[in-house]
Amino acid sequence: MYFFFRTCFELFGNEVKWWITINEPKQICEAGYGTGGFAPGIYSPGVGSYKCAKNVLLAHAKAYHIYDKEFRQKNQGKVAIVIDSNWFEPASAKPEDKEASERALQFSYGLYGNPVFNGDWPAVVKERVAQRSKQAGLKKSRLPALTKEEIKLIKGTHDFLCINHYTSHMVSAWNERPFSDTSFAADIGVNDWMPKEWPRGGEGWFSVWAPGMRKLLNWLKNTYYTTIQRS
């Protein structure tokens, strides 16, 4: 990908001023290397998807630094990564449902956003995957650690924040799944559904609930605002 990014910057840098390195890494990793529904069709739930997440973030960071060091001064462009996320509305005001909402957001957006904006994986993601890995008898976490050098390489590799938002889900806490279930969904550990009263879009997988967009934007502001402003 190094040569691909560099070639794009060289050929189109004079005309293109807003760059996206990778679009929707969660779809690439979870669908491509977790469930296997997308290319390359690898079924490796809770293992391959996390390895992919690390590699995607490193690829993005290297692309950002190529532009920053070799092309920014001349072309004056901006670079970022696009992350997609649903909004996860707590089913009630109960603390456990609010925690379920936050956990789902951290696994959905934070898994890719936190290393870029704050450095390292979100704490809840590290803790959940490490705990479930240990309980399953594994010697180390299924989530590959980011070294100090990798954290430094990835952190701050954004000139603006990008979000693709399609739909919202209602979420609540649930009883822990068997630790032998290594799926991404089991690691998140929430019940999620689309209420019947929410209108469906053209495809059955998404619902129309307008407040979700504003709530997600507010969450992003409250979670990453200081980092974005400082950048």
Image: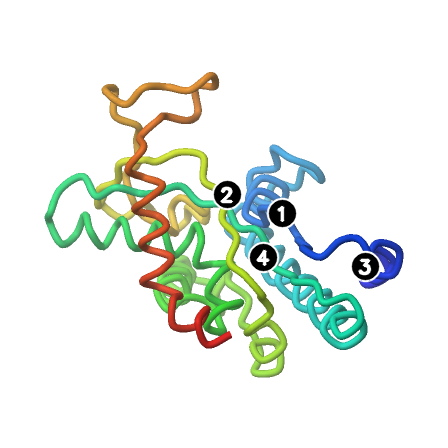
Residue 55 locus on image (x, y percent): 66, 61
Mark closer to the chain start, 2 or 1:
1
Mark 4 or mark 3, earlier in chain: 3
**The one of 69 and 94 positioned closer to us in this rendering:** 69
Q: What residue is drawn where x is 49% and y is 69%?
A: 117
Q: Element at badge 3?
A: loop
Callouts 2 and 4 close, C-beta under 8 Å: no
Numbered tag placed on residue 53 in the rendering: 4
Q: CA distance from mark 3 to mark 2?
A: 24 Å
**Inter-mark Cα distance, 4 to 1:** 13 Å
Q: Identify residue for label 2.
A: 164
Mark closer to the chain start, 3 or 2: 3
- Determine crowd level at label 1: few under 14, some 14-19, many 20+ residues with C-alpha closer than 10 A: some
Q: Is residue 66 left or right of residue 90?
A: right
Position of residue 35 measured from the top left corner of the image (x, y, whole percent): 56, 38
Give, as a three-letter code, the residue at label 3: Gly
Mark 3 and mark 4 in contact (Cβ < 8 Å)?
A: no
Can you see residue 62? yes
Rendered image quadrant of residue 70: bottom right
Secondary structure of residue under mark 1:
strand
| Residue pointed to by mark 1 | 23
Residue designated by label 3: 13
Residue 227, relative to residue 219: is it above or below? below
Tell whether 104 sits left or right of 83: left
Quarter of the image holding residue 63? bottom right
